[in-house]
Image: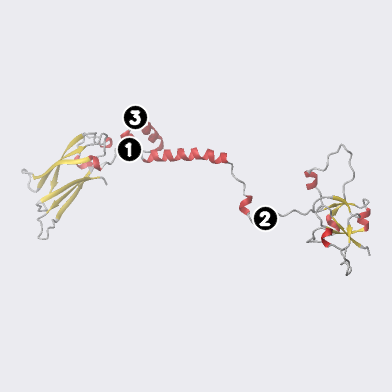
Amino acid sequence: MTEELYTRCPGCKTIFRVTEPQLALRDGQVRCGHCRTVFNGREHLISLAPPAGGEPDYDELAQGPPTVTLRSARSLDPPPPAEPASVVAETETEREADPEPQEQEVDYENRFAWDKRKPKRSRGFYAALVPILVLALVLQSVFHFRDAIAANWPGAKPLLTKACSIAGCAIRPLNDVDALTIDGSELQADPAHQGLLILTATLRNRARYAIAYPHLALSLTGVQAASGMVPTVARRVLAPTDYAGGTIDLPAGMPANREMQVKVFIDASSTTQEGYLLYAFYP
């Protein structure tokens, strides 16, 4: 039976189990399978036998740090043959082609920190992304407020109209109820037709831009009750097409700083009313 010997790598202090035939291959020259250090295995032979009791000169720490794993002789590679001085030392590619298994060092500090190994995006990527996001936000805002932009900045309306023709949208007058007033209204019975009422009113646009034509809500009220409540006996909502004449351009809206006369005939033959309420709104 071949006697087992033990040699220690001077580089990483790893202990290997070796045999004399292995050391005789290259006059004792071996290569550490852990740190790849080439050394003379015979010169670094050690004994793992416990020291005899009472030896005062024995110092275990002098042998180097303790080794966690005792490796077999397969972890020792014979060193490559001597190369001429003109030949460069082995490359990383040659090391990867080595058929012998090699130990890999483990990064114990970061072995569970998967997020630390993620590739970091360069600052240039985010710097290029910011203008794109800002441009997208501006375009979205212009699309959402296109009607207000066209009303307050008429010079931008042709460009917005052209853009909407491509995007499939439209530029419409603003629904600005604050700019709209009913300056006067009147509800009278038609003397020529019994049960027919005539509603007249004056709508005014006080804004410096065109606004959409509103809907008109007409409520016919009855006699005030003792509780002070005024009951509603009938209610009708008039769309712009119900009170605007055929010559009015409804999509263009009510012109700026202009007024409009409204006259509508209401059939109230089935109701009895004492008063009315009229107000404008946008649905």
User: Outermost residue toward the left?
Assistant: 191
Q: Nearer the viewer, mark 1 or mark 2?
A: 2
Is residue 35 or residue 212 the one in the foreground? 35
Q: Mark 1: which amino acid?
A: Ala
Q: Is residue 195 left or right of residue 131?
A: left
What residue type is disc 3 on? Answer: Gly
Amino acid at the residue labelled 2: Glu
Q: Position of residue 242 (x, y in %)?
A: 20, 42
| Residue found at the far bottom of this picture | 53
Q: Secondary structure at mark 3?
A: helix
Q: Is residue 170 visible?
A: no
Q: Earlier in the sequence, mark 1 or mark 2?
A: 2
CA gap between label 2 and label 3 equals: 64 Å
Residue 37, relative to residue 160: is it above or below? below
Residue at (78, 44) in percent of width and height? 93
Q: Residue at x 52, y 40 (%)?
A: 129
Residue marked by disc 2: 109
Q: Is residue 227 visible?
A: yes
On the image, the x and y values in percent for residue 147 come to 33, 38
The earlier-in-sequence mark between 1 and 3 is 1
- Marks 1 and 3 sit apart, C-alpha to C-alpha, by 12 Å
